[in-house]
Amino acid sequence: MSDRPTPPLDVKALWKSQPREIAPVALATIRRDAKQLQRRRLRVLIRETLAAIVAIVIYGLYVRFLPGLLLKIGSGLAILYLIASIWFIFVLFRPRRVPNDAAACLDFHRRELERQRDITRDKWRWALLPLIPIFAVMIVGRWIGPTPPWRVLWLDHAIIIASSIVLVETLILVWLWNRHRADRWQDQIDELDALGKEEP
């Protein structure tokens, strides 16, 4: 007989390892939701990629035609940001094949919901934060750059200040919206966990 104490039972790991008894109707719903999530990702990938390509063309025209070195630098940084965004979109939003097996589909969908929640929660790091120096360079470039001939200086500066305030407010609203969406994804994960605990 060993003198070693019996290791404590990992209840959480034991619970996760148990097969989930879920009604066939619920499994069909989970499979449908999993496929809808992947289709939504495909739509996001296509939409965001096309929007980034259009924006790259516009900023390319800015580099070519806008006066002032800072505006050209800001436009060049925006192009680099958009190229990086396309890469992130392909990596993060690439749709995956939904497995046919019921248990595998349930686990797959839960992992994908967690992934979607984490992408949305961390989006400010890779999507919003890099925009701040780009906007700052372009705003400073507009401020010290030549005033359009049809506009007086004070009005031009007032427009720049108002535009800057709108940009900051927009970034804050997008950040808050992403936090709200991450909470919604967490709600779906909680509902899925509650479904897995229900008796058929």
Image (spheres, helix red, strand yellow):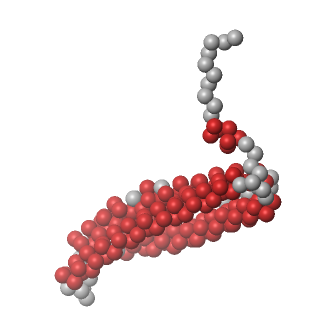
Q: Residue at x 67, y 62 (%)?
A: 38
Image coordinates of residue 6 in percent, x first then y, are 63, 22
53 relative position to 138: left or right: right
Number of numbered discs on residues: 0
Image location (x, y in percent) of residue 157: 22, 78
Q: Quadrant of residue 105?
A: bottom right
Question: What is the x, y in percent for residue 146?
Answer: 24, 76
Q: Is residue 162 above or below residue 12?
A: below
Q: Judge from the rendering whether residue 162 lies leftward or rightward of residue 27; answer left or right.
A: left
Residue 58 drawn above or below residue 38: below
Image quarter (top left, top right, bottom left or bottom right) of the N terminus: top right
Whether residue 157 can be seen here: yes
Q: Is residue 100 above or below residue 16?
A: below
Residue at (44% x, 59% y) in the render: 124
Q: Is residue 196 left or right of residue 139?
A: right
| Residue 63 vs residue 21, the one in the foreground | 21
Quarter of the image with the C terminus in it: bottom right
Identify the residue at the far bottom of this view. Answer: 150
| Residue 42 is at least partly visible in this image | no
Residue 142 in percent (x, y) is at 27, 73
In front: 89, or 64? 89
Q: Nearer the viewer, residue 46 or 77?
A: 46
Left or right, residue 125 beside residue 119: left
